[in-house]
Amino acid sequence: MVKVVVAGEVGTSVKESQAWFRIKEAEIVGVADSLSSLGEILQGTEVDIVDIGSVSESADQWVTLAAQAGKHILCADGSALGREGIRLCDQYGVVLQYANTLRFAPEYEQAHEQIKNGTIGKAGVIRLRRGAPASAENAGKCLFQELGMREFDWLRWTFGEVERVMAREVKHMNESGQIVYYALVMLRMAGGAIAHVELSLADGTEHASFELTGDQGMITHDSRESIPIRWSGGERSLSVTFRGLDLMQRQREHFVRCVQKQEVARLHARDLLAALDIVAAARESVKRGQPVKLIHGGDEG
Amino acid sequence: MKVGIISFAHMHAHSYATYLQKHRDVQLIAVWDDDSRRGEEMATAYQLDFYEDLQVFLQSGIDAVIICSENAKHKEHVIAAARAKKHILCEKPIATEIADAREMIQVCKEEGVMLQVAYPVRFAPVMENVKQIVQSGALGDILAIDGTNHGQMPGGWFIEKELSGGGAATDHIVHLMDLVRWMLQDEVKNVYAELDTRFYEMEVEDCGMVSVEMESGVIVGIDPSWSRPKTFPTWGDVTMRIIGTKGTLDVDVFKQHALYYNDRDSKLQHLPWAVDMDERLIADFVQNVMEGRPPSITGEDGLRTLEVVKAAYESHRLKQVVTINKVHFSS
């Protein structure tokens, strides 16, 4: 049995706990609602995985504590991860993953496999989009990290390292205090493909789409069109999950197999660092008004 | 009003010829083509007189010409037509070099003839609606536009640099750039572009991405790639997402179509049922000539969009953002 501690601020990790209840080979051995309680649990209990749910600011301190104790870490939000915590995980050789990565999203996982299998041939122009509603909470946030990190990581996972980044962004506060925040990012992959990432905090609802073109064909997806059950009329909205497509479950099952050494981690701490490098390059490009060259070692094909 | 067509090199000439013939105030009477076989075929198809000599063609009693020759020949043909005092509708892009475009505009001005550039998408009823929505303020202030003008690879002279001036960037940046300038009444400040040849073995670029900042600060993305697969159900697309302070507008200009699952040819096809924009462009040009009005889309509109194309090529070479130095006219 793999032993899990669910951590995070009081009352915020319900979804994480429920997800672990669905994993046959894991059990929750503790719930930590503060840094000090996490410290205590890690000292007195046998633990394999620390699952960090919602934290209001950086998850860095939580990650540091768990990594120093040699525990594998699953963090709900990739954008809450700081460079220091990630580096520590890399150093201690613990598995660090974040829950909203696209590497376990079935449509992105399939697209990744198709690209690797050569379905579209030589990749040409890759278009990715992610959108979420405007919000008053977006004021201090970095759009590239908040929304872009997932797409950047998927691009790197699928097409290899990034050579150059050009980004532009616009931000506006409207009368109701909502921040409309929008960015266009162009990435030249070291393999030659040209990627276009559109990030929008100006949408009515959450939205994601991709269009992957190559000299042998094109693969497209749009979350607004992949709706097998559509509810209309009435007051209620419909929320459904499909058996086998539950992201939280898929990733946790993978994570357990990693801990049991049955599987190699699909996402490493150094991938997160590389995604953060792309985020930083995009920010730098906005600041300078020029493209930014990313010189990177390249450890994934 | 009598009209002649200079060259059927660009396939739009067929559509223009059809709508000129349908127009009740127009007599389409003459065609000149430097490919005399094509010229004679078109003369037969549309019942026109074919001329091998451009000067004789220009003296055939026509009031106006439609120029659909290869991009690099626009300059020669526009200037010849202007010198013969003919009003001109010139296929886009206006020219392949900025200096050529400037000279063409100057000569038309000197000769007192109208030069209109063919950007038909302005006349798509969908775009007219979009422009109205944008200008009504319903979206608030516009912050950004992300657009595509994708196509299938056209082949022929479009991929011969000396005739076309360039590939997908030359062919497709201008449409979106013209729509953005027209809707926002704004000019381009700077341009960044990544271009490449990744889909086909050929001399010119077949894909890329362009990032533009307007003078107002609006940011614009343009995908001009010939990236539509051979199995794509239509020739390409013109799409835009317009982000305003009060809302986002998703535009797919050619979305008015039925889907045809065609077992006879084993393909999927769009069957458009929208009002044809070329018909409205032709009607507008004819009306402008007949009423002596200024052109709806000027030579300068053509020049401004060409400047963006040239800046995109330069940016691609330099791997830097290129600031536009607008050509100004002494009036």
Image: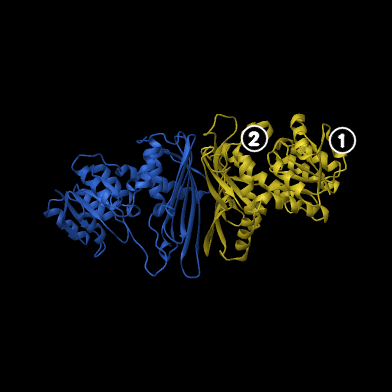
Chain colours: A blue, B yellow
Mark 1 surroundings: few (<14), some (14-19) or many (≥20) residues within 10 A: few
Q: Position of residue A85 (x, y in %)?
A: 28, 50
In the image: residue A23, left or right of residue A298: left
Q: Position of residue B107 (x, y in %)?
A: 82, 44
The disc labelled 1 sits on which kind of residue? Answer: Val
Chain for disc number 2: B
**Disc 2, SS:** helix
Q: Are marks 1 and 2 in contact (CB under 8 Å)?
A: no
Q: Residue at x 40, y 55 (%)?
A: A227
Above or below for A105 versus A174 = above
Chain bearing mark 1: B
**What amino acid type should be assigned to the residue bearing mark 2?**
Phe
Which residue in the protein does label 1 denote?
B56
Q: Is residue A228 left or right of residue B84?
A: left
First in sequence: mark 1 or mark 2? 1
- In this view, the mark in front (1 or 2): 1
Q: Residue sitting at 56 percent across and 41 percent down?
A: B225
Q: How far apart are the alpha carbons under marks 1 and 2?
A: 28 Å
**Side (left or right) of B224 relative to A252:** right
At label 2, counting other C-alpha atoms closer than 10 Å, the crowd grade (few under 14, some 14-19, many 20 or more) is many
Q: Mark number for residue B158?
A: 2
